[in-house]
């Protein structure tokens, strides 16, 4: 027995192929630009996961909280200079640590004196 009416429409809707994301685009529309994906190194996965799962657009962490997430102390360059916290520029690949926030769609802005980092959604 074949369903009809509302039930038939529901069954046919459920059986249709999933949209590809371009079904509603006019012909000739270029695909959206995607930033290259870089693997997050294992030692920074916990920071990445934490930042990626936060709903807030801004997350502020102390160096101590970051160290607790990572399970190891931050290196001296992280405590002494903004360069360690640099976000990737267009010409170069990101540093190992910056992959953790870049892949979570965030930027990092350290305050070395306060020993905090503001991670903002990019």
Image (cartoon, grey):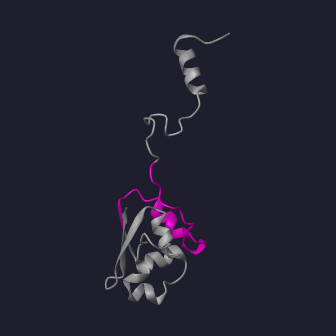
Going 49% across and 38% down the picture, which residue do you hit? Answer: 22
Q: Residue furthest front?
A: 28
Q: Residue furthest right?
A: 1
- The front one of 104 and 59 is 104
Query: Residue 101: which quarter of the image?
Result: bottom left
Picture quarter with the C terminus: bottom left
Going 44% across and 37% down the picture, which residue do you hit? Answer: 25
Residue 47 falls left or right of residue 117:
right
Residue 21 falls left or right of residue 112:
right
Picture quarter with the N terminus: top right
Percent x, y of residue 8: 57, 15
Q: How many marks?
A: 0
Going 41% across and 72% down the picture, which residue do you hit? Answer: 89
Percent x, y of residue 40: 56, 68
Q: Is residue 120 above or below residue 3?
A: below
Percent x, y of residue 61: 39, 73
In the rendered structure, does residue 110 fall within the stretch colored magenta?
no
Query: Residue 29: which quarter of the image?
Result: top left
In the rendered structure, does residue 40 fall within the stretch colored magenta?
yes
- The front one of 52 and 29 is 29
Going 53% across and 62% down the picture, which residue do you hit? Answer: 37
Percent x, y of residue 107: 39, 68
Q: Is residue 84 above or below residue 52?
A: below
Q: Which region shows up in magenta?
A: 32-59
- The front one of 21 and 10 is 21
- The front one of 89 and 50 is 89
């Amino acid at each position: 027995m074949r369903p009809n009416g509302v039930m038939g429409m529901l069954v046919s809707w459920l059986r249709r192929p999933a949209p590809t994301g371009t079904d509603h685009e006019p012909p000739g529309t270029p695909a959206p630009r995607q930033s290259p994906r870089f693997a997050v190194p294992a030692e920074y996965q916990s920071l990445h996961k934490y930042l990626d799962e936060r709903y807030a657009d801004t997350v502020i962490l102390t160096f101590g909280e970051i160290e607790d997430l990572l399970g190891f102390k931050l290196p001296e360059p992280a405590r002494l200079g903004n360069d360690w916290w640099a976000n990737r520029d267009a010409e170069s690949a990101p540093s190992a640590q910056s992959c953790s926030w870049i892949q979570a769609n965030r930027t990092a802005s350290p305050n070395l004196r306060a020993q905090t980092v503001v991670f903002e959604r990019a």
